[in-house]
């Protein structure tokens, strides 16, 4: 007779089998049997957060920086609802998460029991799939399937809801068996014909551009290597979305910077004027396309994506290739090398005019800003942070807002999985818990959360987690006392009526750091900034860095809403005659 | 346009809507209908009618037939999004005008009237396979099977014969000939 295991034991046996080493969680009534079992499984370390949203974002940070699924364990009712923001965030940005929730005992489901909520109902639209385990004999299979669904195809969050009585019941444990085909869902549907067509388009193009996104990162580090190979082999320019930063080295000459609403002038103009756009693992998000009717009007568009529903969703494309980026790029490179040896050399002439044009756009220096000797410009702070950390293998997380865009513009990423930011959902409060997750996964590496003072207050309680586990995360706050991006939109669109976007009564972040038992550092002038940053980097404990920056600075360049790529607003230097007041406001 | 005070772009040109019948084969498990219907409401797609029942007890498969309207792009999205759901096995899509597909809806009509009117009511239904399911001295329940618009028309025209209650299913669909949708 095989050994019988309780539901709680089965949960951990599955986690062990799936190679999970860390889970983020918060105990409560409906998960107590699982928590009771924790002591018997030494290979799994539990990280106690201070709020379930923090558990979710920490698991996201863990997943993004390692490529492995993040796991969180929370209780029923409020535990589950608190995790919903993080699940939605992971769903939007395609991050593999496995969320295990407790549920009231099966006989109480539907009776409005204490801490009961319809967890599977609430999370149905924000997970790839979810399960309510009603029978103990299904538990091991469901747990394994949960990991499979989360990590295959386009990754995303899944949730397993386990009633408390199921956690106590006993049954046999079923090992993980990999099913080859999953309910008729295959992900590599492309053919050699697609690849041949792609190569044909590449060899004909006079004004080509690569437009890459988070899909490249999700496909694994090998995909980034292949992408670099392809970009060098073609000599084409490349731009990246917010999520794709790092899959191509930012300091390379072929990289045009980020595109989209706050992308560079050269990237957006190249997107507008190109004759061949090769989208690799991006999704034509509205922050990227601007006005859709005038989006890159003269180009042939290729879209390589693992998710068939991404294709033709927002923008109609000429050549869709459905497949894992790693395998598509492998085939493309093989075909290119076979049919066109030394393509980048032979093709140089054909695209030389295009590069000249790009250089002209580049000479606008659209990321420039007006420096200051009295106040710290936020862009300057990020530039200095980059210069002082670039020799280390640094992991950057961010919150959401102006600081996030400045970080994307001015911090240069050279490796994938080093940049964790909430793009799709735009969750303020993401960065601090994400940094906790990243530091757990990479204990020896430097992890910096580039934050805004408004965002960071939303999940500030996780500093306590960082202190508990000796995680030397650095919270680098660009403090302008405003919800900066809200203030910027109010300035541009609502006659400078700064309705509720100023935060009065901010805490003293240095004292706050001390209260949490970590280190607080404040920088007030550009002169002292470098020394203070170095002081932060030399501190082997969690640090809250309060960087007092210019309160009025806006994030440029910018594509106003409803405008195409070629009608950007540039920074204040270029902006003098078309200052965005009065009449200019109608531009936006 | 000029005064757009939005952080989002403005809606582009509107395209023409077509009516499509989407057939979905799913695992018959708890919550599967909610997943399908939730996908429609969550993404703003229409459901004009819906019919669902188990069709294969051994394999535990249900067949959901959804009548929907949308632009060609939206219809494509509906199919692709449905295919992503874990319990969905396959998705078929037919245009309503498609001659190769049979669509039928069933309706139950209850009439309360005198004998003469009840007789007229039955006669009026004669093109739509009428079956009398229940009969009393002053009432009749008649079942018909027909197209959606025919039933629409009937329920309007039959009021004069004492129609007091209508109950109808959503459309179900099947291809003509020997071919089976794979």
Image (spheres, coloured by chain):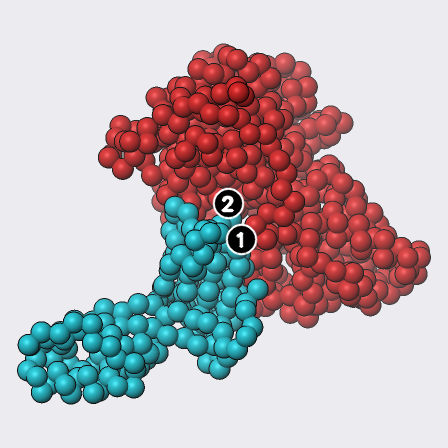
Residue at the (55%, 29%) spot, across then down = A174
Q: Secondary structure at mark 1?
A: helix
**Drawn side of residue A122 relative to residue B90, left or right:** left
The disc label shown at residue A24, or none: none
The disc label shown at residue B84, or none: 1
Frontmost residue, A314 versus A14: A14
Query: Chain under label 2?
Result: A
Q: Is residue A318 visible?
A: yes
Q: Residue B165: where, in percent of width, then height? A: 16, 71
Residue at the (65%, 19%) spot, across then down = A443
Q: In the rendering, what colour is chain B?
A: cyan
Residue at the (51%, 31%) spot, across then down = A140
Do residues under tags 2 and 1 come within 8 Å of each other at their CB atoms?
Answer: yes
Q: Could you tell me how far apart the alpha carbons at marks 2 and 1 are, in whole angstroms?
A: 8 Å
| Vertical side of A154 occupied by A34: above or below | above
| Vertical side of A480 occupied by A212: above or below | below
Please give the letter of the chain rendered in red: A
Query: Chain under label 1?
Result: B
Q: Residue A205: where, in percent of width, then height? A: 80, 66
């Amino acid at each position: 007779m095989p050994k019988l295991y309780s539901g709680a034991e089965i949960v951990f046996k599955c986690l062990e089998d799936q190679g999970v080493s860390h889970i983020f969680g918060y105990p409560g009534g409906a998960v107590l049997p699982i928590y009771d079992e924790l002591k018997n499984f030494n290979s799994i370390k539990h990280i106690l957060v201070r709020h379930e949203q923090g558990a979710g974002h920490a698991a996201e940070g863990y997943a993004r920086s390692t490529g492995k699924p993040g796991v969180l364990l929370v209780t029923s009712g409020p535990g589950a609802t608190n995790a919903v923001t993080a699940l939605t965030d992971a769903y939007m940005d395609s991050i593999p998460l496995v969320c295990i929730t407790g549920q009231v005992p099966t006989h109480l489901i539907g009776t409005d029991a204490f801490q009961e909520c319809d967890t599977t109902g609430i999370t149905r639209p924000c997970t790839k799939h979810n399960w309510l385990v009603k029978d103990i004999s299904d538990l091991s299979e469901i747990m394994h399937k949960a990991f499979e669904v989360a990590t295959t195809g386009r990754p995303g969050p899944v949730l397993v809801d386990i009633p408390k009585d199921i956690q106590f019941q006993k049954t046999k444990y079923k090992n993980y068996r990999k099913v080859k085909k999953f309910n008729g869902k295959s992900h590599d549907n492309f053919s050699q014909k697609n690849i041949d067509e792609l190569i044909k388009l590449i060899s004909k193009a006079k004004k080509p551009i690569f437009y890459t996104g988070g899909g490249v990162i999700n496909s694994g580090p090998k995909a980034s290597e292949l992408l670099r190979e392809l970009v060098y082999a073609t000599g084409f320019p490349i731009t990246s979305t917010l999520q794709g930063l790092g899959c191509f080295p930012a300091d390379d000459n072929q990289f045009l910077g980020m595109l989209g609403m706050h992308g560079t002038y050269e990237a957006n103009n190249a997107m507008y004027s190109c004759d061949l756009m090769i989208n690799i693992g991006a999704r034509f998000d509205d922050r990227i396309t601007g006005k859709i009717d005038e989006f890159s009007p003269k180009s042939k568009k290729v879209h390589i994506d693992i998710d068939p529903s991404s294709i033709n969703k927002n923008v109609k494309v000429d050549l869709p290739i459905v497949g894992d980026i790693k395998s598509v790029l492998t085939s493309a490179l093989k075909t290119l090398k076979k049919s066109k040896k030394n393509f980048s050399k032979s093709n140089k002439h054909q695209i030389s005019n295009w590069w000249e044009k790009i250089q002209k756009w580049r000479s606008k220096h659209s990321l420039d800003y007006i420096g200051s000797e009295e106040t710290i410009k936020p862009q300057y702070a990020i530039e200095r942070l980059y210069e002082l950390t670039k020799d280390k293998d640094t992991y950057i997380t961010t919150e959401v807002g102006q600081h996030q865009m400045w970080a994307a513009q001015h911090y240069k990423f050279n490796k994938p999985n080093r940049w964790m930011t909430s793009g799709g959902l735009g969750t303020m409060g993401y960065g601090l818990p994400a940094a906790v997750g990243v530091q757990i996964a990479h204990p020896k590496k430097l992890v910096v959360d580039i934050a805004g003072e408004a965002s960071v207050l939303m999940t500030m309680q996780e500093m306590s987690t960082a202190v508990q586990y000796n995680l030397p995360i650095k919270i680098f706050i660009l403090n302008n006392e405003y919800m900066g991006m809200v203030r910027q939109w109010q300035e541009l669109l609502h006659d400078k009526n700064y309705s509720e976007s100023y935060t009065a009564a901010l805490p003293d972040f240095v004292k706050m750091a001390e209260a949490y038992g970590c280190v607080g550092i404040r920088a007030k002038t550009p002169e002292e900034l470098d020394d203070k940053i170095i002081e932060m980097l030399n501190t082997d404990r969690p640090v809250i860095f309060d960087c007092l920056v210019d309160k009025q600075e806006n994030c440029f360049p910018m594509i106003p809403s409803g405008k195409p790529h070629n009608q950007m607003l540039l920074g204040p230097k270029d902006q003098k005659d078309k200052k965005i007041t009065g009449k200019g406001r109608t531009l936006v | 346009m000029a005064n757009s005070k939005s952080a989002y772009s403005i809606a582009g040109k509107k395209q023409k809507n077509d009516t499509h019948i989407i057939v979905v084969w799913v695992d018959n498990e708890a919550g599967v209908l909610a997943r399908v219907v939730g996908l429609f409401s969550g993404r703003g797609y229409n459901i004009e009618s819906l019919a669902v029942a188990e069709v294969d007890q051994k394999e535990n498969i249900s067949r959901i037939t959804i009548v929907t309207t949308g632009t060609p792009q939206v219809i494509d999205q509906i199919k692709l999004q449905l295919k992503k759901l874990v319990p969905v096995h396959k998705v078929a899509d037919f245009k309503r005008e498609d001659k190769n597909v049979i669509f039928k809806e069933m309706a139950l009509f209850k009439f309360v009237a005198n004998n003469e009117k009840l007789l007229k009511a039955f006669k009026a239904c004669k093109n739509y396979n009428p079956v009398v399911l229940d009969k009393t001295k002053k009432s009749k329940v008649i079942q018909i099977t027909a197209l959606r618009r025919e039933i629409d028309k009937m329920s309007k025209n039959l009021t004069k014969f004492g129609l007091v209650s209508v109950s109808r299913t959503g459309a179900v669909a099947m291809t003509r000939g020997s071919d089976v949708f794979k």
